[in-house]
Image: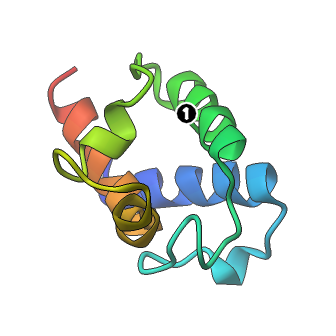
Amino acid sequence: MDRAQIESTLRTIIVTALRVKPEHVTPGARVFSDLGAESIDIIDIRFNIESAFKIKVRDDEITRSLGDGLSTDEIAESLTVGSLCDFVERRLDHA
């Protein structure tokens, strides 16, 4: 699966989970502050990533992929649609 397919699938997952307009789901969009996600939404997104990409994602694996020891505020600023794409791309490369 190439990057464009990953982005397209993630866009669909995020639009559905967060009920946002597709045009707002850009690589630089911050999942929490720009798209309005809450912690529970990340769980939904995680399960949908697992289903769509046929990978298993541990509870905090997505946030840990941003860096160790980040505060909640730092995670909120760092978790973007692009970083989610990077995460999925890395996982698929190692699957």
Q: In the image shown, does 2 or 66 lie closer to the viewer? A: 66
List x then y, in percent, for residue 38.
68, 53
Quadrant housing the N terminus: top left
Q: Is residue 84 visible?
A: yes
Please determine whether, in this image, residue 52 is positioned above or below residue 24. above
Q: Which residue is painted at 46% across and 64% down in the image? A: 76
Q: Is residue 88 visible?
A: no
In which image quadrant can residue 56 be found?
top left
Which kind of residue does numbered mark 1 sit on? Arg
In which image quadrant can residue 77 be found?
bottom left
Q: Which residue is painted at 66% across and 55% down in the image? A: 14
Q: Is residue 76 left or right of residue 14?
A: left
List x then y, in percent, for residue 50.
51, 24
Q: Which residue is painted at 33% across and 31% down in the image? A: 61
Q: In the image shown, does 80 or 69 lie closer to the viewer? A: 69
Quadrant housing the C terminus: top left
Please determine whether, in this image, residue 11 is positioned above or below residue 53. below
**Residue under numbered circle 1:** 46
